[in-house]
Image (cartoon, rainbow, N blue to C red):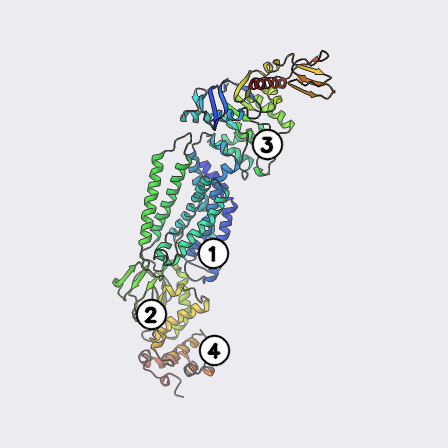
Amino acid sequence: MKAVARMEARHLVRSPLLWLGVALAAALTALEMSWFLPALAGDDLLAYTAGGLPLGAGALLAGAWLGLRDRVSGAADLVAVTPTAPWRLWRARLVGVAAAAVGMFAVGFAVALAVSAARGGRGTPDLRLLADGALALVLGGWVGVTVGRLSGSRMVSVLAAPVWLVLWFFVVTGGPGVAGRSLSVQNLAPVLNPQGHSAAYGLLPDPLWPHLGYLLGLTLLVGGLLLVLVSRGSAQRVPLRPLLVVAVTGAVLAGTGGTRLLTLPDVLLVLGPDRASWKPVQGDVYSPEAVSDDPGWSFPADDHARACAGDAALTACVYPGYGQRLARQMHAAMAPVAGVFTGLSGVPTRVRMVPVGNGSCRGIEVQVPEGLVREPAGRSDGNTRHLYIGFYLQCALGLSSVPDDHPVGDARDAVSFWALVASGTIPREELAGIAGTDPLWGPVATAALAMAALPTAQVRADLAPVWERLRAGRLPISELPGQRA
Amino acid sequence: MVSGAHVRVEGVRKSYGGVAALAELDLELGPGITGLLGPNGAGKTTLIRILATLLPPSAGQVGVNGWWTSDLRDRVEIRRRLGYLPQDLGLYPRFTVFEFVDYLALLKELDDPAERHRRVRAALAAVELEDLARRKIRTLSGGMRRRVGIAQAIVADPLLLLLDEPTTGLDPEQRMRFRQLIAGIGEQRTVVLSTHLVEDVAAVCTQVVVLWQGRVRFHGTPSQLRQLADGQVWSSLEATAGAVASWRTESGAYRVLGERPSPAAEAVAPTVEDGYLLVCARAREEAAA
């Protein structure tokens, strides 16, 4: 029956329905990628999520057509008078559907990654995502075969695909109204919500393993039941015991996996810098994290940010799932500004991705929250670069991440402006424009321009004696380099 | 030398919602070609489907080489030796001709790819479709599809070949080639051919069974069927009202089947069709009585 499976897979791979799913998935993925900066995380996740549902619907339609084929074509009698037992034939057909679905998923995934690569994307695909996405397609295909075979109706089969999409769409988008547990319920969809998955990278329980079990269970259950049903009244008895074992195993896997997904903590409650105080909990609001009220806390060292890039002066490390490209991008953004401050005491030499927060300092370490890096709003290269530079300057100059905590016109703002000009991040003319027109920031910009008129090394040398006072917010602008004249 | 299948039909009845399609049918068929003749609704297709193990009889039993269709395991053994062309032939339109016949050959347990492909090519050659092997089935004409159906029926070299209206849609030349093909197969195999076309039966069958309302009205050779009409076929210049059948021929004279229509009428040699029409007419008379 391997040959039948191969033949069915070959035919399914030629199915326009499946290719329609691939095209739709590729289009959706490309569309999503146009909203997300390529340098940001999860191209693999985008491919997985954006592609999963349309590909699944395509697999379902192709499967349904296979399920219908004998009846609609009128070839049922030709097949029925062969000595091949129906359960063997349908088992081979299911294997064929699975092989075609996996192949299509691989194509969809490769297309998405190729689009991503062409746009300069990066990221290390999680192999479990590949398995999970492929299983979602296999499930869709097998459900399609079941619908087609049991309904015998083209109309029902055609309608099954949108019903499948709508059903999972409501699960994926299900808000607190759905059992009051939005994220957990979303986990029951054939493809996981990436926001629920990626937010913590090991800080929340990973839903992928139970999701894999849940999908595998559903797939086995559907396949086992179909084989029993198609063999009703056939000349050859179905081997009930092994099929029952498959179906029961599937039910157990789906049940335990589904229960685990429903009870999985989806919120990391961070009560303080001590990791022992972080609590994964199941939330009833849509929020990947709950941060302590204290904006001053920072994350102690953990070993989660392991993808690093940099040099002796500054190293940037992010979660491995984001790949080194993000680390290099962070470093490239911050390194020129960091170079301006080289040698001054207490300036950051490390940048580390942390799970939650607003951006903070821990000694000489800039802590960049993952959530902000992933924030879709304002994702352009310039905005992201300024975001990273802002984090660095806050940390280097001892500025609070909460803007109201220091008065406008602080000497630290002037040093920030100077650093931006001295590092070539913004042109001197831009600062001059602020100095001449902005009543609030004008004096600060003027002071920064005066500093920028001096050689960078001299400003750095002049700042060294007053550096601690500056960082403490006790240095008046008049004592900054270049102000006395 | 391979011998064909021995088919035994014992007291077979088949009813559809109280309507008897077959009534107490007893038949024995051996190697050679048996033609099933009968008007619409006579039970030909029902009998073929029962022989093909697709329909269980309401009563009685059917055996093929000692295997009984009522037994699950025997049924599989029968199917291993069966080739079947249904009246309403359905094919997979998106498959190519070769793929479709190859697919059915796989389901008929021809597992060795090289041997299977050889047989598929041979079957396609037998129905003169080898040049169209790569064509999608949806692009074929009705006659070509019928030939694909025949190819899949013979691909596994079956001992028992059941053909329900096999020549429907074939042009005269193809019908002639089909007869040659079936005649060759019938030398060593058991072929049951259900048809409305008496000339097909007359041309290739070694046995004829005429069914009427689910009962066997005649079972013998085509010659015996023809001989039933000896002395009952006439050429007359006048149409005859009470004849079994009467129709005007090319010469302008009437061919009359039945009692001598007039003293001037001349006896002519009967055909198998005459014998068949006579059997049907007698059956109709008996039913009316």
Q: Secondary structure at mark 4?
A: helix
* Number of the front mark, 1 or 4: 1
Left or right: residue B189 compared with residue A449: right
Secondary structure at badge 2 equals: strand
Which residue is the site of mark 2? A360
Helix, strand or loop for disc 3: loop
Q: Counting other residues with Cα less than 10 Å from the Cα at mark 1, is it few (<14), some (14-19), or many (20 or more)?
A: many
**Contact (CB < 8 A) between labels 3 and 2?**
no
Question: Which quarter of the image is occupied by the C terminus of chain B?
Answer: top right
Identify the mark nearer the N-term, 1 or 4.
1
Label 2 with label 1: CB-CB less than 8 Å: no
Amino acid beneath label 2: Ser
Query: Viewer-nearest of labels 2 and 1?
Result: 1
Give A157 or A92, whichever is nearer the viewer: A157
Image-based side of A271 in relation to B218, left or right: left
Q: Residue furthest front?
A: B289
How crowded pointer 3 is (Cα within 10 Å; few <14, some 14-19, many 20+) is rated as: many
* Amino acid carrying mark 3 in the image: Leu
Which residue has dot 1 on it?
A29
Mark seen at residue B129: 3
Label 2 in the same subunit as label 1: yes
Q: What distance separates the C-alpha of mark 2 from that of mark 4? A: 28 Å
